[in-house]
Amino acid sequence: MSPLLKLPVLSALAALLCALPAHAQSELPAPEQIQTVEVKAAHTRLVPYKELFYPMAKAVQQSLAGRAALAVQLRPARAGVRTDDLAVWLEGGGESLQVRPGEHGLYIVPVADRTAQQDGSFSINKNPSDLRANLVIVPTLAPDAWTIGEVRRLLHDVHAAIDPLVPWHHRFLMRAFTRKLGVSVCSLSPSGHVDVRDGERLLATYPTSEPGRNHANAPVYCHRFTGNEDFDPRARLVLPDDAQVLLI
């Protein structure tokens, strides 16, 4: 295993259960639509694709398609390491697909069956020891599609997607960890708020006042929904204009 990921599988799984805002990241292309090119340069092998990234991305796609995707966050391991010129490729079988960063520098993990069959890997133009990798689930639900029912369904389906991938001897600890997951609606402003509405009727208003940080390490202010709120599943969440939605 790459020196970048010397942490046990459990740690990687736990890191995956953080999430980042995404005002509807675009859906991933089907594997047969992915354009590939020949490998032209020597890149540094980051981590194998088939063993961890592919099964997780596949499980998230199958259970959460249209609502969330799997992404990789790469952050400096120490001061002085630049990431503004970072490039990431998915390579295998003599082909290379550049994986471009989305919002806040997250790299959506493609579900590429052929690359997995060819024992492909992620590669970067950096020394792997200079970076830290986290797996995260990125919500892709449109801002105007959030309801109390969608919050509950997403939290339930995250468990369904991840539990089968956790070794049996880690499942008790992982379930204890994921039981605390919630959907946090965040804003860049401490005076923001999220409304819960039934049609035009306002049911509740919650300030986004709990301080936190997103995956770009920028300060945000949040209100967390656990899925246990006493509202009809059809009640809509009206998000702030600059809303970021995180699974934390």
Image: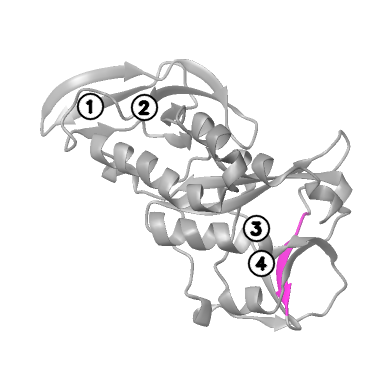
Three-letter code for the amino acid on which mark 1 is drawn: Val
Using the image, determine if residue 226 lies above or below residue 45. Answer: above
What residue is at 48 percent from the left and 71 percent from the top?
29
The tag on residue 226 is 2
Q: Nearer the viewer, mark 3 or mark 2?
A: 3
Please give the residue where the numbered disc 1 appears in the rendered image: 196
Three-letter code for the amino acid on which mark 4 is drawn: Lys
Q: Nearer the viewer, mark 1 or mark 3?
A: 3
- Tell me where residue 97 sits by quadrant: bottom right
- Magenta residues span 86-92
Please give the residue where the numbered disc 3 appears in the rendered image: 52
Q: Nearer the viewer, mark 4 or mark 1?
A: 4
Three-letter code for the amino acid on which mark 3 is drawn: Leu
Q: Secondary structure at mark 4?
A: helix
Q: Give the spatial CA distance, label 4 vs label 1.
A: 42 Å
Task: Judge from the rendering whether residue 139 lies leftward or rightward of residue 172; answer left or right.
Answer: left
Please give the residue where the numbered disc 4 appears in the rendered image: 50
Task: Judge from the rendering whether residue 137 lies leftward or rightward of residue 9; answer left or right.
Answer: left
Query: N-terminal of the two: label 4 or label 1?
Result: 4
Q: Give the spatial CA distance, label 3 vs label 2.
A: 28 Å
What residue is at 43 percent from the left and 45 percent from the top?
158
Examine the rendering and report whether any part of residue 76 can be seen.
Answer: yes
Residue 82 location (% of width, % of height): 83, 45
